[in-house]
Amino acid sequence: MQNSREIKLFHYEAIDSTMEAARRLVAEGFDDIAVIRADTQIAGRGRVPGRRWQDAPGASLLMTLVLPPLATLPSALPLRAGLGVLSCIKPLVSERFRLALKWPNDVLVLPSRGDEHGLVAKLSGILCETVQGRALVGIGINVRKASSAGVLDRQAISIEDITNGDLGVFGSLDEAALQVAESVLGVFSYEGWQHEYLAHFWGLGSWVEFSAGRPPEILKVQGVLEGITEDGALILSHDGESRVYHAGEVENVQLIQ
């Protein structure tokens, strides 16, 4: 999808959540591209029910990108959005760290290669929803050290931590929101996105535990991460065959050296 129209930025100091604000905007008839950004959210949430995104006011980039009306929504929306976020941050990262994509919706920070058992921490989370045929891409990025991720069982890390304090465009959250939006929109028209995603896919070729499905119907399986399909589903090899999963969560990755 080419971004040929101006992105409208809506900024709030405090709001229930940027996703809910985006839903209200669509309900009011807004039919173009928009970014909703807030300094803090009172009711931010994650992809899994019951998980909250916690933030320190002004320390995180909290935004929802509202896509324009489309005849067909982009396939693998959360994965493409994650790749767009990663691409926007990657040029700032110091040589001590590298970025990875955890299926289907997190951007992780890993140590540089050669220290595979070092820190694995969450930098960004993504939540995609649709309303009235419109796609909404919620994005949370830990920018400053005061920020914290909503997934409480995973260590959080910030852009400030991994760039030696040089925030680049993320020094201005309004500018950062627009640049992230541009990067995500660009991935929607990028034919090579799947290959690029696999190049950053955390755990590819490794043995993992996987919680398939959505609560309350969860099936625990184990296997080797083989890749992703064109529509963004996970391919897991176990019990002698490859199986495709459209929902679930990757856990306990045992990296292959």
Image (tube, rainbow, N blue to C red):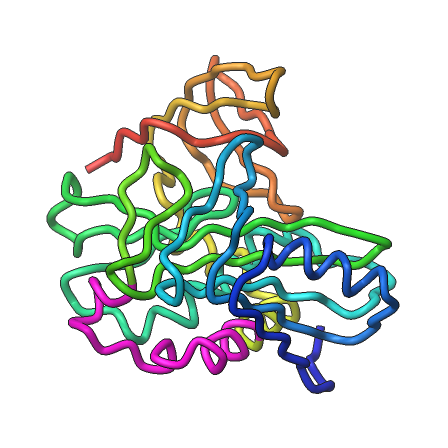
Residue 68 position, x and y percent, is 78, 70
Q: Main secondary structure of the magenta part?
A: helix
Residue 98 position, x and y percent, is 25, 59
- Give above or below for 164 relative to 225: below
The residue sitting at 43% across, 69% down in the picture is 87
The residue sitting at 64% across, 54% down in the picture is 77
Residue 16 position, x and y percent, is 60, 53
Please state the extent of the stretch shown in magenta in the rendering. 159-181
The residue sitting at 60% across, 62% down in the picture is 64
Q: Is residue 131 left or right of residue 55?
A: right
Q: Is residue 178 magenta?
A: yes
Question: Residue 146's image quarter?
Answer: bottom left
Question: Residue 188's image quarter?
Answer: bottom right
Q: Is residue 228 left or right of residue 7?
A: left
* In the foreground, 194 or 110: 110
- Give above or below for 45 relative to 7: above
Q: Is residue 62 left or right of residue 27?
A: left
Question: Residue 158's image quarter?
Answer: bottom left
Q: Is residue 76 left or right of residue 4?
A: left
Q: Is residue 255 magenta?
A: no
* In the foreground, 3 or 192: 3
* In the foreground, 239 or 97: 97
Residue farthest left in this picture? 114
The residue sitting at 36% across, 59% down in the picture is 142
- Give above or below for 241 relative to 39: above
Q: Is residue 72 visible?
A: yes
